[in-house]
Image (tube, grey):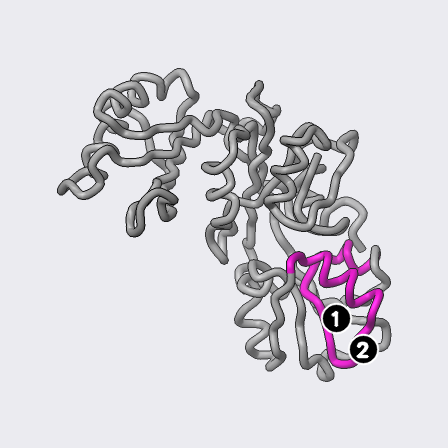
């Protein structure tokens, strides 16, 4: 199971939530490398973040889903308790620089502003903890999980520093086309990528979404990303609360009207995990 980041990253916990303790996590530096590992056969599946309840969408994941041929096979959502970590003996009042992934820094924006420290974006939450543990810096701290502190010899200066106490990140399980990964008891969900047939025509998006309504399909989320074919034109990602079979009629009608529609996956929707740290945190 490939994931982006170092051991101790929230994505590693998502691997455990999605596929259990038997899963063998494979750390990758970037999201692109997660997709590469699966396509090269070095991993069977991967877990990638797609959305945070505070910081919003992870746009690189959406772009990769359209660029590559991997399917979404499942999803999981986990509560995120961000912690401020520092080398042993450091004091909170001495922190002047904070390292972490841009999403984690965004999730803790208000706390870090009050702290008055400079924020420095790096590729991963656990990666920032690992770097700080290997090369301690006076006045430096990292935002990561409590488990990362234990893995990399750091102390927890503050827990739960995220701005939203109900901070949750949603992850997709991606892999070659195949059956859905067993998930929670959530309702079926299908992810569609939609390119409008005539996106300059008035009401083009309205009529495309109206086709879903005509087929009595509920749309729970829509995300737009720039098209790679033309500037200022867009692809839309649609979360539809139905399985692929129920979406087939609408997909066929949209294609008949000239729309570019891809079914990126059909899977059980997530059920958030319980509160608290991931297993092994401390």
Q: In this rendering, is residue 116 above or below 100?
A: below
User: Measuring 47% from the left and 43% from the top, which residue is drawn there?
Assistant: 63
Is 85 displayed left or right of 81 in the figure?
right
Q: Residues within 10 Å of mark 2 (few under 14, many from 20)?
A: some
Locate residue 42, reporting x and y percent.
73, 32
Locate residue 154, reporting x and y percent.
82, 65
Q: Residues within 10 Å of mark 1 (few under 14, many from 20)?
A: some
Mark 1 vs mark 2: in front: 2
Q: Magenta stretch containing residue 139, yes or no? A: yes
Label 1: state its secondary structure.
Answer: strand
Q: Nearer the viewer, residue 176 or 10?
A: 176
User: Measuring 70% from the left and 67% from the top, which residue is drawn there?
Assistant: 142
Q: N-terminal of the two: label 1 or label 2?
A: 2
Residue where numbered disc 2 is placed: 90
Residue where numbered disc 1 is placed: 157
Q: Magenta stretch containing residue 212, yes or no? A: no
Q: In this rendering, is residue 66 above or below 30?
A: above
- Point out the stretch of residues depicted in magenta: 123-150
Q: Residue 234's image quarter? A: top left
Assign the C terminus to one quadrant of the image. bottom right
Locate residue 109, reporting x and y percent.
54, 69
């Amino acid at each position: 199971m490939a994931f982006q980041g170092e051991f101790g990253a929230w994505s590693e916990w998502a691997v455990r939530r999605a596929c259990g303790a038997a899963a063998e996590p494979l750390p990758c530096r970037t999201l692109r490398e997660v997709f590469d590992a699966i396509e090269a056969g070095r991993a069977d599946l991967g877990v990638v973040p797609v959305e945070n309840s505070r910081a919003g969408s992870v746009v690189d994941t959406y772009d990769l889903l359209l660029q590559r041929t991997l399917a979404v096979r499942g999803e999981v959502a986990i509560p995120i308790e961000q912690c401020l970590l520092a080398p042993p003996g450091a004091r909170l009042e001495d922190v002047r620089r904070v390292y972490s992934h841009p999403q984690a820094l965004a999730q803790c924006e208000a706390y870090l502003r009050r702290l008055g420290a400079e924020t420095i974006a790096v590729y991963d939450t656990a990666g920032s903890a690992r770097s700080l543990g290997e090369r301690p810096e006076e006045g430096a701290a990292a935002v990561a999980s409590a488990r990362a502190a234990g893995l990399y010899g750091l102390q927890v200066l503050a827990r739960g520093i995220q701005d939203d106490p109900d901070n949750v990140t949603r992850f997709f399980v991606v892999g070659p086309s195949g059956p859905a990964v067993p998930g929670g008891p959530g309702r079926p969900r299908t992810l569609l990528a939609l390119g409008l047939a005539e996106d300059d025509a008035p009401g083009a998006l309205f009529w495309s979404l109206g086709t879903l309504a005509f087929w009595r399909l509920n749309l729970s989320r829509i995300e737009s990303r720039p098209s790679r074919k033309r500037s200022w034109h867009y692809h839309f990602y649609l979360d539809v609360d139905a399985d692929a079979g129920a979406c087939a009629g609408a997909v066929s009608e949209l294609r008949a009207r000239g729309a570019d529609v891809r079914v990126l996956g059909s899977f059980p929707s997530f059920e958030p995990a319980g509160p608290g740290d991931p297993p092994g945190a401390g």
